[in-house]
Amino acid sequence: MAGSNTAQFLSWLADTAEARGWQWLDDFDRSLITAIRTGKGHPVGVEIYEGRPQSRQAKFLIRGVQKRLKDLPTVLCYVDDCGYSVLALRALLTQFYWQLRDAPVGSDEHCVYIDLEAAISKASDQTKVVAAALTRGFGSQEIGKALGTNGSRLISRSMRELRDILNSKKLYAVEGE
């Protein structure tokens, strides 16, 4: 599926809600979800698909996504269904990193922590710095100011690098093999 990271998350959320029998989609919502998936139709859905929310409705949806990304079971279910995404990684690092680290060994939460640590260890130095800053509560403005660059872009680049590492088959490969 193409579209912004937010569009992908909302599409997954709609599918998950439907599969679990949650009754929250009316005809308006269905046309909106179709536009979020295709980039055609409802103007708010197109904004989300393109990753450029401008309208009040689109910004409202973004706030709803941010609220959902503060719920660890939702984020873990999203990762389980769709793999590590930029949105999920940022949520895991900013919201849940210490909780994941302290989770019982062998639990899903601790396994995600191990994945994060393995990916960070294979990442560039800049991504390591960004990940460490995110786990310590720094936002995009603080990161940008500290590193003398656009923090949002740097975080996005770093999350894409971690996503690519995590979704590769080489994450746990031993050097020399």
Image (cartoon, rainbow, N blue to C red):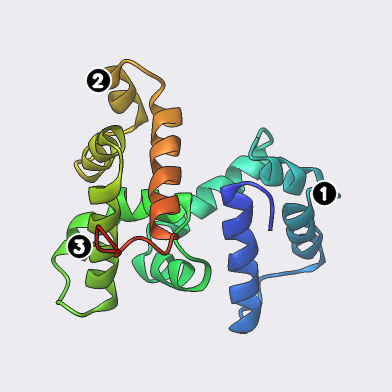
Which quadrant of the structure image shows residue 13?
bottom right
Q: Sequence order check: which comes first, mark 1 or mark 3?
A: 1
Mark before the other along the chain sequence, 3 or 2: 3
Q: Name the residue under label 1.
A: 42
- Give the camera-side residue of 27 and 137: 137
Residue ID at (65%, 38%): 56
Left or right relative to 95: residue 136: left
39 w.r.t. 84: above or below: above
Q: Residue at x 79, y 54 (%)?
A: 38
Q: Mark 3 points at which residue?
A: 99
> Residue 60 or 159: which is nearer the viewer?
159
Separation of disc 2 and disc 1 at Cα?
A: 40 Å
Q: Type of residue at label 1?
A: His
Kind of residue at disc 3 = Gln
Q: In which quarter of the image is residue 109?
A: bottom left
Farthest residue toward the right? 41
